[in-house]
Image (tube, helix red, strand yellow):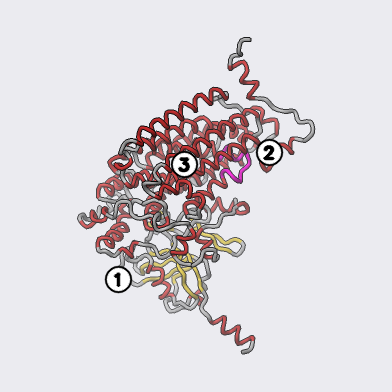
Amino acid sequence: MALLKREEWQGIVRDVDWTLKYVDDEAVYPEWHSGTGKVPRDAWQKWEESYKVSYPDYVATQREKENSAYAVQSALKRSKAFETLDEGWKSATKMHFGGVALVEGMATLAELKMARFGLSPAWRNMSIFGALDEMRHTQITLLFGHEFVSKDPQYDWSHKAFHTNDWVTVSLRSLFDAMMTGANAVDMAIQLPLTFETGFTNLQFVALSADALEAGDINFANMISSIQTDEARHSQQGGPTLEILVEHDPVRAQWTVDKFFWLSARAFAALTGPSMDYYTPVEHRKQSYREFMEEWIIDQFMRTLSDYGLKKPWYWDEFMEGLDIWHHSLNMGLWFWRPTLWWKPVAGVDEASRQWLNEKYPNWETVYGDKWRVIAENINSGNMEATLPETLPWLCSMCHLPTCNANYGRDGKWRVRNYSLKHNGMTYHFCTKGCRQIWWEDRDNLNHTTVVERFLLGEIQPMDVPGVLGYMGLTPDVMGDDAHNYHWASSFSQSEPAGTAGGR
Amino acid sequence: MTETAEATETAAEPQLVPVNAIFADDFVEILVAITTADTIAEVAGKVAYHVEGKRVRARDAEKVVYHNDRALTPDLTVAEAGIAPFDHIRVDYADA
């Protein structure tokens, strides 16, 4: 018997569904897992995506990808490529391995939730491929990271990071638990594939891949490029879900997109921003973080909003202003609190870098120049104690990142402003108005306390810096120190301040 | 010791008051532990300790503590000024 052509059987196979006889629909697709909300149940029958992958096609393609990625890795194992990489770049990869590997694992479960509770057979079918993708991403990221454990114990945090209470991990866990673990299928399809994967992973996987190649890290570029090819497919689950939600519940659609665009932007400012503008050696940078954000994220996000009839988020002006501040402040925070990290943070402010930063960000010298100069003066005079923290940065109750976003106020000054609120007898502080607003709307659904709150509630003992480092799982062989042995500081003793030309 | 006397003695003990603080134009708010018995001048010093000469260039100028956008008198105590745990305070140079 001749085999049917794929187009003759695939639609039937993909859209197989059951007419429930012994239980009602709510028992199989309960609201708290499926999340149809105001959308009529049969509206989901219109759910459609354009990839229409079959299992044999999927397996064949993935096999090729795997062979290709591991062939490159195998060839590079015999080279001295790793030894020639800049220490700062290695840190960007350690941050990625620890911050991403087990998030891919969480995404496997998220895809499986949609594969079980998604409201159309086509959606559930695609989510199965998504789960297989994410399983591969978890494995490949762990394997590539662990290859270097024998050379540097910080790579062990590729797996370990998400099993600790390091403040970076707590921040990411808070974001991804909200995005994936605690979300129903409808919200998740908009939060993860649409807002995060379509919106942001391009930045991590495409932009960082370009920087990796420039930095000579073919292995890392090879790995993340291999992952990105999957993202392009399974991220397509978001569009059809959003289309149906917008039609029946536009307020929920707008809020869900707005919230996770903001929270994703905060996380990327902490991880990708420093990687691109500080950790990648200045001579290898393709574009600034801001330029990448404008080209790869903002243009696309605005198109998405327009395509689905959504409005620009309420926080847009604050977000755009943050492109010149968030990641610079976070880089300074990562560096100053360097013992709390599983990588070696990069100051990234030698003379050539400062010149580059001032060209790309006209207010950089005004806001950050003299602070780095004071730090450098302490290093140059041998006063290292003054460059190490003796207390904690305050962490935002929403994004769990340091509250470190200066803005230019009506008082004519660049200052970090305090955004706080009182609720049930507690005072909460936030990094921005955006985080405060999201926290307030979601206040009954939040369950992660910040590391500072845990400290003040007595959960961390002893209540001092060593106690905090122990709580975070950091040991002396792993805790971060300057990636370049402080050599950059000497450039400050040879040059005058860059001045504030161009800054306001 | 009577129950009343014991309560009075306990109340007189300085209590720890962890606050969210920012110093001048520093880039980040920090956790600073002060006590109810500290004077506002001492609070300014405790906040400045973590920042001045470490990230913000030290200046020979008087420091002012602001709480709820109000400048506090240096000889008040934290208790008298009504600064509570988790409150935000700003310390800045008087001429800033």
> Disc 3 and disc 2: Cα gap in Å?
41 Å
Identify the subunit bearing mark 1.
B
Q: Residue at x 39, y 44 (%)?
A: A148
Nearest to the observer: residue A184 or residue B24: A184
Identify the subunit bearing mark 3.
A
Which stretch appears magenta?
Answer: A179-191
Q: Is residue A22 left or right of residue A256?
A: right
Q: Quadrant of residue A252?
A: top right
Secondary structure state at the residue bearing disc 1: loop
Q: Where does the image place residue B48, in percent across and percent down from the top left? A: 38, 68
For the residues tagged 3 and 1, is the chain the same? no
Which residue occupies the extreme right position in the image?
A22
Instruction: Give the residue number, with chain letter if any, for mark 2.
Output: A38
Q: Mark 1: which amino acid?
A: Asp
Instruction: Quadrant for the N terminus of chain B, please.
Output: bottom right
Mark 1 nearby-residue class (10 Å; few <14, some 14–19, many ≥20): few
Q: Mark 3: which amino acid?
A: Leu
Q: Where does the image place residue A291, in percent across and percent down from the top left? A: 37, 39
Instruction: Give the residue number, with chain letter if any, for mark 1.
Output: B60
Numbered mark located on residue A142 in the image: 3
Q: Residue at x 44, y 71 (%)?
A: B71
Q: Is residue B15 above or below residue A265?
A: below
Nearest to the observer: residue A247 or residue A157: A157
Which residue occupies the extreme left position in the image?
A494
> Disc 3 and disc 1: Cα gap in Å?
53 Å
For the residues tagged 3 and 2, is the chain the same? yes
Q: Visible in this render: residue A52?
A: no
Q: Visible in this render: residue A464?
A: yes
Identify the subunit bearing mark 2.
A
Q: Residue at x 62, y 51 (%)?
A: A445
Mark 2 nearby-residue class (10 Å; few <14, some 14–19, many ≥20): few
